[in-house]
Amino acid sequence: MLNRKEPLYAVSACLAMIVVSAFTGCAKGPVVGEEIPARIGNWRVEVGPAGNEVYQHSEEKIKPPTDVVLRWPAIIAPHTSIDKWELDFDDDEYEIDTEVGDEEYEFKVTPAGDLVSIEYENDETYIKEVPDELVLKGTKQKVELTDVPPEALKTLAKALPNAKPDKAFAAQTIAGKRYGIVIGDLVFYARPDGQIQAAGLVEDDALDEVDPRTIEATGVNLDPEAFNAQLEKQLGPYRERFNFANQIRKLGQGPKGADSAYRYIVLGDSRSKWELWSNIVKHIDQLDPKPAFVINVGDIVPDGFMDQFRDYYIPPLLETDIPYFVSIGNHDEGVRNQVREYRYLFGENSLNYYFDYGKARYVFIDNNTDATDEDEMLEWLGQTLAETPAGFRKIVAAHYPPGNIEKWEYHSWGEDESKVFTDLMTKHAVDAVYLGHIHAYSTAVLSGVQYTISGGGGAGLHDRFGPLGNVHHYVICDVAPDGTVKQQVVRFYEAE
């Protein structure tokens, strides 16, 4: 957590604006519209005005899991109880978390009741068993079904009464000896006492073997020295460029133009569809005038692993000189959800930070990872907003939307934290709050504060916000010399 008395990223401002609504129009400032490319790659581009308060309540999407879905945790881990469940809109499957003591299971099951995967984690031993990151290379040995623990076979016969095991093997894993049982397109991993610990689809690499010398493959049992060596090898060449503190220094104190107008971009949830993500970066880079910086509201890669930053997030950005700032998302946490890869690339103080540009303060918070204590973060946020120089606009970026905005409640931050957060936004008269997590474009006003969800950077779209909301997009924000801000939404449609 940053020191509240001496915040890390405090950049003095030198230009004057007045505080106004983030959605108001302006007569001056960057001219927008005609110069925005109408096509990029295989995508057709349309530009429209800001604002989308459409909400189409979807009963189908909020139905709790049925008994045919819940039978999996009931059969596989009856000694645990359900902690929470949610519907993954990307893959149309339920994620069901069960726990007992320090043990946690995560089941992914389709609405029809088909098992997708089982993962196990122990918070005391820091062991995490994931089907495609489990079996150590060179240790797999074929065994007869009669060699498999009987309790495992009984459990599987109950779970899949109309299917029989095809084959079995024994292997050493990061968690010790496991038996692999293949049934159709599924692989189940059982302990010697018969307890099923993990499962996955063959087509999802559940039979993969991993080299114990590799870092991410060994999951939780990471040697710090080896892990750091891998970080340096894979991400070291990019640290100086992508470190947020360095980008803030490069950005400077304010716009260079004589009229003090500038432009910035907001987008988020760009972790999927590399073709779209790379073309969005190209499209933004072609804007005239070019944006001063980009705000990404999180989920920039699928899991936060170092190779994903190296191969997915970084390459398109090497072709542009526009600074990109991120509010970390839940998919950016990395191995063991410790956010080591993210902080290595972007800086140790890259979770909760701010900078001043022109006469505005831009604050980025982590409201979704275990690396940040929420109470401390909210205290820091309140202090940072309170210390904003008089006359400055205040902009906050976070990943999770507040759940006390009803239409976002289904996929949001916790109820108590949301209330504290929105109260802070109102108390400090924040001008704009940018959010992600919901894969759509949606806007709302709560107690005079304007909130915008921009989660259309590539991840699978949600279906509740109408044709102008359920779409891949980014948002252009043009700041005029008098401080007014005009927003436009740039939408992407696959060309026919």
Image (cartoon, helix red, strand yellow):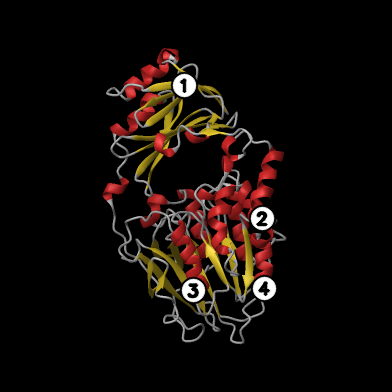
Specify the amino acid type for callout 2.
Asn
Residue 55 rendering spot, x and y as whole percentages: 31, 60
Q: Which residue is labeled 4 in the image?
A: 252
- Above or below, comparing residue 310 to residue 468 in the picture: above
Asked where in the image residue 18 lies, by quadrant, the reply is bottom right
Instruction: Tell me how far mark 1 sits from mark 2, CA to CA.
Output: 46 Å
Q: For mark 3, does the 10 Å Cα neighbourhood hold few (<14), some (14 to 19), or many (20 or more) residues?
A: many
Q: Which residue is labeled 2 in the image?
A: 349
Regarding mark 3 in the picture, which secondary structure is present there?
strand
Instruction: Tell me how far mark 3 sits from mark 2, CA to CA.
Output: 26 Å
Earlier in the chain: of badge 1 and badge 3, it is 1
Q: Quadrant of the C terminus?
A: bottom left
Q: Which residue is labeled 3 in the image?
A: 477
The residue that appears at 37% across and 49% down in the rendered structure is 89
Q: Which residue is labeled 1 in the image?
A: 169
Earlier in the chain: of badge 4 and badge 3, it is 4
Discs 1, 2 touching: Cβ within 8 Å: no
Residue 60 rendering spot, x and y as whole percentages: 27, 47
Task: Tell me if 268 is positioned left or right of 307 in this view.
Answer: left
The residue that appears at 59% across and 83% down in the rendered structure is 260
Regarding mark 1 in the picture, which secondary structure is present there?
strand
Earlier in the chain: of badge 1 and badge 4, it is 1
